[in-house]
Image: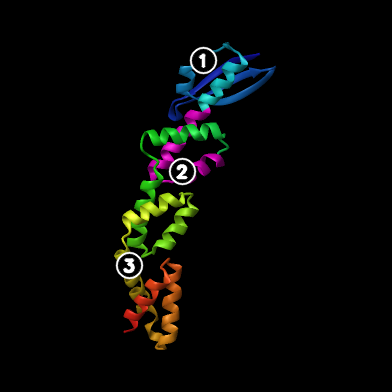
Amino acid sequence: MIKVIKLKLYNKTNSCYTHFLIDDEVVDIKLHFDIVLKHKLSKNQILSKKEFEELIFDNNLLYAKNMAYTYATYKMRTEKEVIEKLRRKDYNETIIERCLEFLKEFKLLNDYNYAQLFAKEKAKSKLWGKYRIKTELLKKGVKSNIIEDAIYNSFPEEENYNIALESAKKKYRQIKYKKDPIKIKMSLSSYLQRNGFDFETINKVIEEIIE
């Protein structure tokens, strides 16, 4: 038998601490007030096991959606980031899937848009090349085909060279005191590799810088 023995509303958190008697044991559960209204809970109400399970599922789903919404609107996120956030809170896969559908429905989750904006922002602010951007997006769980399309559409080849050149000039100003051209070339090459530029671009840029 599952019986509601007490309901205590907290207006500040829009929640209701509900005391259930389950098989002669008192269990306290924090329910969202909307769930209390939806299931029309009242003191001394008797619930079947199925009704109780639906109540708990609906409650967990609502809190998970609120968390996912807050997380995804604070700044853009990838699907993987949202999934990992919800898993850390021990939500099951069914609830996580429903949260992803909810965010996509309101256009708050789109890995392609995320990849495009990420590529443009990192190229501009960090002077990263395509390979560094791709590596970082893969870490965030974005699929390879999405990354390739996003980079192709937002990162023209000529732009890649200009970014590499700007990045190299910035680094060169820091290391030109070394005087030794070989050491300068090695430093520039290593730096540009770490920032995700291909060898052909690196060689052209270094030639131009040294000249």
Q: Is residue 82 depicted above or below 17 in this figure? A: below
Give the residue at mark 3.
163
* Kind of residue indicated by mark 3: Ile
For the residue carrying disc 2, how many other residues have a C-alpha within 10 Å: few (<14), some (14-19), or many (20+)? some
Using the numbered discs, state the Cα–Cα distance from disc 1 to disc 3 in whole angstroms. Answer: 61 Å
Neighbor class of circle 3 (other Cα within 10 Å; few <14, some 14-19, many 20+) is some
Residue position marked by numbered label 2 in the rendering: 79
Residue bearing mark 1:
41
Give the vertical position of 154 relative to 26 (above or below): below
How has the structure been colored for display? rainbow
Asked whether disc 1 touches disc 3, contact meaning CB atoms under 8 Å apart, the reply is no
Quarter of the image where one finds residue 55: top right
Residue 158 position, x and y percent, is 29, 66
**Is 205 colored magenta in this rendering?**
no
Q: Which mark is residue 75?
A: none
The magenta segment is 60-88
Task: Residue type at mark 1: give it.
Answer: Leu
Tell me the amino acid under the disc marked 2.
Answer: Glu
Q: How far separated are the C-alphas under marks 2 and 1?
A: 35 Å
Q: How many C-alpha atoms fall within 10 Å of the one at disc 1: few (<14), some, or many (≥20)?
A: some
Residue 85, percent across and down? 51, 43
- Nearer-the-camera pick, 202 or 43: 202
Left or right relative to 43: residue 204: left
Work out how far the residue at label 2 is from the one at label 3, CA to CA, in angstroms: 29 Å
Going from N to C along the chain, the mark reached first, 2 or 3, is 2
Camera-side mark, 1 or 3? 3
Q: Quadrant of the C terminus?
A: bottom left
Instruction: Provide the major secondary structure of the magenta segment.
Output: helix
The quadrant of the rendering that contains the N terminus is: top right
Residue located at (46% from left, 18% from top): 38
